[in-house]
Image: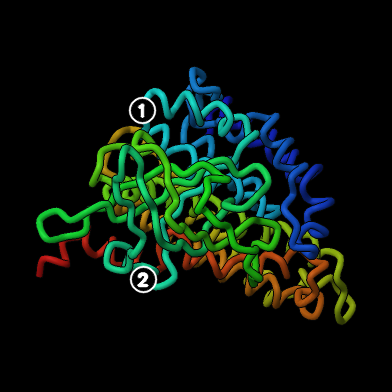
């Protein structure tokens, strides 16, 4: 059971998603346009500052509050939900977790208000899941400045009009025969920092995703985020937390499929009855609801362990794995239930189907989640 504070937040975001986002997001999606007006309203509600303390302009909540919000938004649209998730989990939280007092003061108030979006530049065109092995971006100290060269791919929130800062993971040297990886904050508009045009994507079409390139891009030495050489450990922690958030988003999409189907099967007639009268349809929706419910319990459990300060890597991987699978399965079944209408972009389930697949890929593929689970079970030592 959710306490009163969580319940009130969930109801507030549910109403916002239904009354503000749902009526307009389809048009944004088809135009592949970033929904600045919706983002501004989310900022005014304090959603970008949910897990950040009040001293940094946040709402003084916690990460579970963010997850509940992501779930409710994704019941209606995943583009809006991923914009919030990436801005907070990947943009603001690393600065909050690892930043200096000066970095927090400079960036967190604007990030918490939604006035500015942050991004996290990790993935590279030739890297994929092999982050350390595939990393080629470098940062070299020169006269009190970092000189950054390299390319990042598939970076969310990196090219909007309100993007303010990108945390860039880069090789800053060698330590014990291995790459020394650090994270450096690069403000938008820095000379040598180029943002490519938006990708043409299968889904998440109302979110911003781009390739970034750095050519002799210079930033002050004090833009180093956390300790030098700790970038790999930092982004592993960031991704562990982010997997719970993506699990929540996935549960929202899965629940949205159930919501849409329950409405549709009462209206659509076939052979003299609403199609919900037939057991074949009933069983599909029952399975969809069961997948959603169990996935929600998985991310609730992972969030509970995280907030209690207990190890949660395995639980986060489980939550991300089962919930992304549920989102994919539910969107496929919802499209089938809608029939030809499910193939039309004007219906939400068509959007859900296009949005679901990336959930099995982003912030760690399903294969990576299985690897992490097996490793936490001690199987990698056999």
> What residue is at 56 percent from the left and 70 percent from the top?
357
- Where on the picture, by quarter, is residue 344? bottom right
The tag earlier along the polypeptide, 1 or 2, is 1
Q: Nearer the viewer, residue 297 or 143?
A: 143
How many C-alpha atoms fall within 10 Å of the one at disc 1: few (<14), some, or many (≥20)?
some
Q: Quadrant of residue 58?
A: top right
Residue 287 visible in image: no
Residue under numbered circle 2: 367
In this rendering, position of residue 353 left or right of residue 119: right
Name the front one of labels 1 and 2. 1
Check residue 271 in the rendering and tell me which mark sits there, or answer none.
Answer: none
Q: In this orientation, which residue lies closer to the viewer: 268 or 159?
A: 159
Along the horizontal axis of the image, is 284 left or right of 302?
right
- Number of labelled discs? 2
Q: Residue at x 86, y 74 (%)?
A: 273
> Is 101 rendered above or below residue 119?
above
The image shows residue 213 at horizontal and vertical percentages of: 49, 60
Does residue 86 lie above or below 274 as drawn? above
Residue closest to the far top: 55
Disc 1 is placed on an element classified as: loop
Label 1 belongs to which residue? Answer: 100
Q: Check whether the beta carbons of the residues at disc 1 and disc 2 lie within 8 A of each other.
A: no
Query: Mark 2 falls on what kind of element?
Result: helix
State whether residue 197 appears in this view.
yes
Residue at the farthest front position = 143
- Disc 1 and disc 2: Cα gap in Å? 35 Å
């Amino acid at each position: 059971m959710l306490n009163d504070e969580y319940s009130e937040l969930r109801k507030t975001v549910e109403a916002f998603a239904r009354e503000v986002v749902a009526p307009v997001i389809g048009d944004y999606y088809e135009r592949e346009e970033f929904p600045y007006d919706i983002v501004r309203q989310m900022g005014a509600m304090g959603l970008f500052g949910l897990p950040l303390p009040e001293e940094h302009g946040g709402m003084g909540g916690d990460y579970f509050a963010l997850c509940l919000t992501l779930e409710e938004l994704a019941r209606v649209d995943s583009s809006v939900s991923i914009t919030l998730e990436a801005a907070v989990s990947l943009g603001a939280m690393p600065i909050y977790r690892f930043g200096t007092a000066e970095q927090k003061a400079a960036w967190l108030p604007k990030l918490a208000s939604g006035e500015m979006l942050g991004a996290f530049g990790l993935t590279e065109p030739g890297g994929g899941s092999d982050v350390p092995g595939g990393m080629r971006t470098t940062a070299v100290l020169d006269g009190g400045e970092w000189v950054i060269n390299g390319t990042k791919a598939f970076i969310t929130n990196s090219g909007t009009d309100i993007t303010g800062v990108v945390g860039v993971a880069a090789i800053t040297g060698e330590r014990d025969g291995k790459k020394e990886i650090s994270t450096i904050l690069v403000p938008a508009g820095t000379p040598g920092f180029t943002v490519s045009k938006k990708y043409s994507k299968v889904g998440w079409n109302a979110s911003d995703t781009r390739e970034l390139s750095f050519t002799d891009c210079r930033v002050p030495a004090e833009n180093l985020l956390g300790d030098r050489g700790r970038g790999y450990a930092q982004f592993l922690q960031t991704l562990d937390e982010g997997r719970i958030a993506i699990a929540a988003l996935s549960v929202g999409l899965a629940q949205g499929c159930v919501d849409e189907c329950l409405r549709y099967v009462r209206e659509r007639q076939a052979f003299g009855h609403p199609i919900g009268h037939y057991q074949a349809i009933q069983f599909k929706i029952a399975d969809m609801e069961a997948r959603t419910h169990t996935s929600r319990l998985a991310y609730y459990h992972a969030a509970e362990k995280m907030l209690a300060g207990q190890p949660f890597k395995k639980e986060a991987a489980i939550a991300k794995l089962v919930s992304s699978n549920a989102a994919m399965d539910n969107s496929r079944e919802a499209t089938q239930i809608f029939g030809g209408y499910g193939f039309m972009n004007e219906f939400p389930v068509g959007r859900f189907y296009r949005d679901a697949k990336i959930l099995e890929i982003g912030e760690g593929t399903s294969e990576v989640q299985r690897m992490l689970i097996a490793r936490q079970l001690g199987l990698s030592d056999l």
